[in-house]
Image (spheres, rainbow, N blue to C red):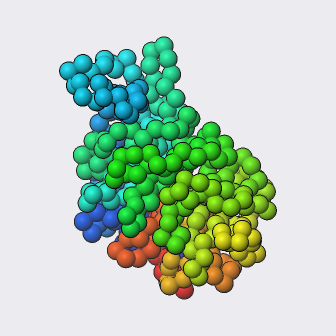
Amino acid sequence: MTDERMIPELSGRARWRTRHDTTSLIEVDGAPLAVGVDEEGVLHTCDLRTGARTEVPLDLDPQTLVGPLLHDEEDEEFEEDEEDEEDLSEYEVDTYKLAARVAALHLGGRPVVLTGADRFDVLMTDDDYGGGAVRAWDLRTGRMIGRPMDGHELGVTALTALAGPGAALSVSSSEEGRLVVWDLDRGERVANLAGSYNGVMGAGFAGGRPIAATGGHHDYVEVWDLAAGERIGEPLTGIDGPVRAIAVTEVEGRAVVLAAGDADTALYRWDLVGGGSAGAPLTGHTDSVIDLAAVVAGGRPIAVSGAADRTARVWDLAGGGQIGAPIEGCWLLEDVAVIGGVPVALTSSLEGELQVWDLDRAAR
C-alpha cells in the first residue's frame, strides 16, 4: 500500500545515484525539478511531474574555474589585462570531486545551482590545489556565475543556500571547520569563521537575521550571526559528539537549534536566546541520525530527520514528539523545500529512486 503522505504523481520518475547531499529540489516555471551533478561534471534535472530529463555539461574552463583562485581579488592587472591570460592548461579538473555538495536557489530571476568541492578538485601536474571552492552555475546553460567562492582549505562538508529579504547567501562548512559565507548578489565573502573540524552545519533565519549552527568532532554546537560575523553566546552542550546533523528554525517566535550525534539516536533541542534546553530529546530512531531539516508545515514548526535505520521521521517542535509513523525505506533524506506553496521532503531509496512527501499532510 502506498503511504498516503507520498505525492505519487511526483515520485518514482527519477532514478539516479549521486553522492550524499548532491540532489536538491527547485521550482522552475512551475515545474518541480530534482537537480544533481554527476561524477562527470554533468548537471542533471528531472521534471518530477513528467519525468522529462535534461543533461547540461558544466563549463569546466580552467580560466574561470581556477584562475581567480590564484590571484588576490584586488589584483587589477589580472582582472583587466585579458590579453595576457595565464596558461592554465596544466590544470586538470577532477569532476568527481567538483560537486561534493549541492544546493539550489533563484538568484536575480534565474535558477542557480551551487556546488561545494571536495579537497583537490583541481590538480596540477606537479602541485596540488587545495579544493573546497563553492561555485554558482546557471541551471539552464551550465556556465559558472561570477568567481569561485574560496575560503576553505579542505573539502566542503555542508552547503546551504539562504534566500530571504535582502539576502542571498552561500553558507558552507568544511573538513577543517571553516564556516564561510558569501553574498551571492554582491559576489563578496562576508564571513570566514572557525568551527569544529569535520564540520556539519545548518542555517536559516531567526528574527529576520541569517544564522548558522555548526558542529563536528566536538561534543558541542556553536551558533553564528552571519550578518555580524560573530558567534552568538556560548557553545551549546549536552550532546554526545561527534555531531552528525544540525538544523536551525523558529518555534513560537524563538530561535531553536536541533542537532544529533553519533553516540545515540536522539534529536537534541536548544533555545538560542537562553542557551538552555528547548525540550526533552526527541527519540524514536534506532540508528544514527544522518540528516535534519526544519520547515513550517500544517501551520506548525516541524523537523524531518533521516537516519541510518533507513527511515525518515517527522517531529512536532512545539509540542514535542513524533508525528505519525516512520516513513519507511528511505536511504537518504535529500532535501526539504517549498514547491507550489507546499512544503515537501525529497528522499531516495537504496535503489536511487526519488520520492516526494507532502509535509502538510505528514504534519496532521
- Count numbered badges in the picture: 0
Residue 343 at what x, y percent from top left?
45, 74
Q: Is residue 234 above or below residue 116?
A: below
| For residue 155, side relative to residue 34 (left or right) | right
Residue at 70 percent of width and 54 percent of height = 243
Residue at 60 percent of width and 72 percent of height = 255
Residue at 39 percent of width and 38 percent of height = 148
| For residue 23, side relative to residue 140 (left or right) | right
Residue 279 at what x, y percent from top left?
73, 76
Q: Quadrant of residue 10?
A: bottom left
Viewer-closest of 152 and 363: 152
Q: Is residue 114 above or below residue 67?
A: below
Residue 95 at what x, y percent from top left?
42, 34
Viewer-closest of 121 and 46: 121
Residue 254 at what x, y percent from top left?
60, 76
Q: Is residue 248 visible?
A: yes
- Residue farthest to the top? 126
Residue at 40 percent of width and 66 percent of height = 164
Quadrant containing the C terminus in the rendered view: bottom right
Q: Is residue 33 visible?
A: no
Q: Is residue 317 above or below residue 269?
A: below
Q: Is residue 355 above or below residue 242?
A: below
- Residue farthest to the left? 83
| For residue 340, side relative to residue 306 (left or right) | left
Q: Quadrant of residue 166?
A: bottom left
